[in-house]
Image: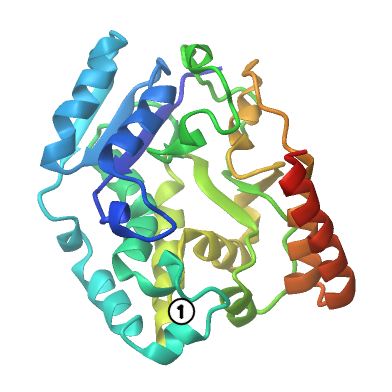
Amino acid sequence: MNEISIVTAFFDIGRKNWKGFERDNSTYANYFKFWARVKNHIVVYTEPKMAEQVKKIRADYNLLDKTTIIVVEDVRKLDEYIYILLSNVLSNKLTVKFRRHPWMPECCNPLYNYIMYLKTYFLTDAINRGLVKNSMVAWVDFGFNHGGEIYSISEEFSLTLTDENLNHKIHLFSVDKLDDTPIFEIVRNMHTYIAGAVIIAPSDMWNILFDLYRQATISLAQCGFSDDDQTLAVMAYRANPDVFEIHPIDDMFSSFDIFNQKLSKHKIKQYKKIRKEAQRLIYKDKQYFLGLKIFLKYLWLKLQKK
């Protein structure tokens, strides 16, 4: 049983100005502060204006000696070919209109999809630089858990995450069972299979995942599409399923359950479970009447906040 290393990243992509998705830098700093008590070594890729804030958060927990901050002046330059490729793809109005919710960032914002793609880039870069000393490495979103959305007590993150019960595979976390739905249909209906907030893999396998994500990004673009890392993960799994271990989870942030730590969780509200079922019936199973009936039940429960 050995300690794992963690890599994360934050870059300001203008979310505070996205109608319906408004989150400024201070919001994300507070999200990070909630889980940044973990005693594992963390490598943080970020821009100059956020670097000192990250440093202070870890210093306040007496963990600065287990923190490496990599300042990136212009994130667009890290893989400029991919950024330009995604920008060109999403400049096509037909590509955007193809999506079920074309106003959402993964449908119309190339910088958002580019940053999501870079998760595996950052991991591979940290390993290649020798910044990661442990044999098992985890990606954890900077905004993981949204400040207590699932795991409710910040102080409980003052622990050391280990590789106990983790085999030599790439570990992904699924919120729905993987099937054979064509990728173009997944892109169109925006159904979520893989939660991208946490990925865990041995250090010698992250380059495999990076190659799979990059090829998936290029393949989508060649078909006139672009999507975030949730679809890239599905494509990567289909390309080489033998290197993956898929762990079902109840919601987008429950992946820390794999560490067998006693983290207090909010009870998932019933109406959220009903919404998930309605979405599956409508967008995946094409059972529109039943799906609509259940969706109406979701709306009623939400109004009751049950």
Q: Pinpoint residue 232: horizontal percent, then vertical percent.
A: 50, 64
Q: Does 155 sit left or right of 190 as displayed?
A: left
Kindly identify the residue that appears in the image at 27 percent across and 77 percent down: 87
Type of colouring = rainbow
* Quarter location, residue 46: top left
Which residue is situated farthest in the front direction here? 303
Q: Nearer the viewer, residue 126 or 113?
A: 113
Q: Position of residue 56 (x, y in %)?
A: 20, 19
Look at the numbered disc 1 and give the secondary structure of its residue.
helix
In the rendered image, which quarter is residue 79 located in? bottom left
In the rendered image, the quadrant that contains the C terminus is top right
Residue at 12% across, 39% down: 49
Q: Please state the horizontal and vertical placement of residue 66, each as a whole percent of the image.
A: 28, 17
- How many callouts does the rendering have? 1
Answer with left or right where residue 29 lies relative to residue 243: left
Q: Residues within 10 Å of mark 1 (few under 14, many from 20)?
A: many
Residue furthest top in the image: 62
Mark yes or no: residue 224 visible. no
Quadrant that contains the N terminus: top right
The residue at 28%/18% (across/down) is: 58
Q: Amino acid at mark 1?
A: Leu
> x, y (%) of residue 81?
23, 73
Which residue is drawn at the image coordinates 53% and 21% (left, top)? 162
Is the residue 224 above or below the residue 169 in the image?
A: below
Q: Which residue is mark 1?
A: 220
Is residue 181 something that shows in the picture?
yes
Residue 40 placement, left or right of 157: left
With respect to residue 31, does 67 lie above or below?
above
